[in-house]
Image: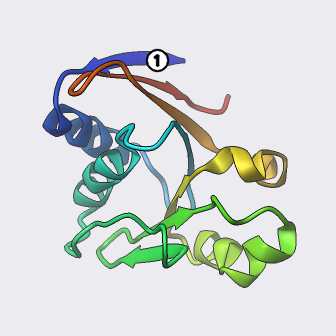
């Protein structure tokens, strides 16, 4: 497990960009962290690092936002998803199977269901207005 402290939104974006460099097709990144922690900012960096050109926004109301690029990103909000049927209906497994990198915010709501996908776990903790503690745990 690696721990990082970022001191601005841009540093959080940059860390996401660096993580993208090591993401193979079909990688699942499972995010945890409260509202306003910086999950979407981190996903902006992921998208940029994967070469996606679409504007990144929170998938709160859409459930999933898909960003096109040489290595596409499917950005999920699992806040209202709790069952295997819900995941399947949202296309979660389809995106993994097609080789997209999948970023899942509120992954704790489906932790047991997604464990088989061997996710990279990213926890973002808001320390103050600009500072974040980000822990990244990659599967062994």
Dot 1, how many residues are within 10 Å of its Cα: few (below 14), some (14-19), or many (20+)? Answer: few
| The image quarter in which residue 47 lies | bottom left
Q: How is the image coloured?
A: rainbow
Residue 66 picture quarter: bottom left
Q: Secondary structure at mark 1?
A: strand
Q: 6 left or right of 102?
A: left
Is 87 or 106 nearer to us in this picture? 106
Give the total of numbered labels: 1
**Quadrant location, the C terminus:** top right
Task: For residue 118, say whether it is visible.
Answer: no
How far across and down, in percent of the image, does residue 121 sit?
58, 36
Q: Is residue 61 toward the left or the right of residue 4 in the image?
A: right
* Residue 68 x %, y %: 32, 79
- Tell me if I can see residue 96 in this picture: yes
Find residue 97 and report its horizontal and vertical position in percent: 65, 74
- The quadrant of the image that shows the N terminus is top right
- Residue drawn where x is 35% and y is 18% of the image: 127
The residue tagged 1 is 2
Residue at horizontal 30 percent and vertical 73 percent from the top:
70
Residue closest to the eye, 125 or 85: 125
Identify the residue at image location x=81%, y=50%.
116
Residue 25 horizontal/vertical position (percent)? 50, 62
Is 81 placed above or below 123 here? below
Looking at the picture, does residue 9 appear above or below residue 53? above
In the figure, 104 relative to 100: above or below?
A: above
Residue shown at 57% from the left, 40% from the top: 120
């Amino acid at each position: 497990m690696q721990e990082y402290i970022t001191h601005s939104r841009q540093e959080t974006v940059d860390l996401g960009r660096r993580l993208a460099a090591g993401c193979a097709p079909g990688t699942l990144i499972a995010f945890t962290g409260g509202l306003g922690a910086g999950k979407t900012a981190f996903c902006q960096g992921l998208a940029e690092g994967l070469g996606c050109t679409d504007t990144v926004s929170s998938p709160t109301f859409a459930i999933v936002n898909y960003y096109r690029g040489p290595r596409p990103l499917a950005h999920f909000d699992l806040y209202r998803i709790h069952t295997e049927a819900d995941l399947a209906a949202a296309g979660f497994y389809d995106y993994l199977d097609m080789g997209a990198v999948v970023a899942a915010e509120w992954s704790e709501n489906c932790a047991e269901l997604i464990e088989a996908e061997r996710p990279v776990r990213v926890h973002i903790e808001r320390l103050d207005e600009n500072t974040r503690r980000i822990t990244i745990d990659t599967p062994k």
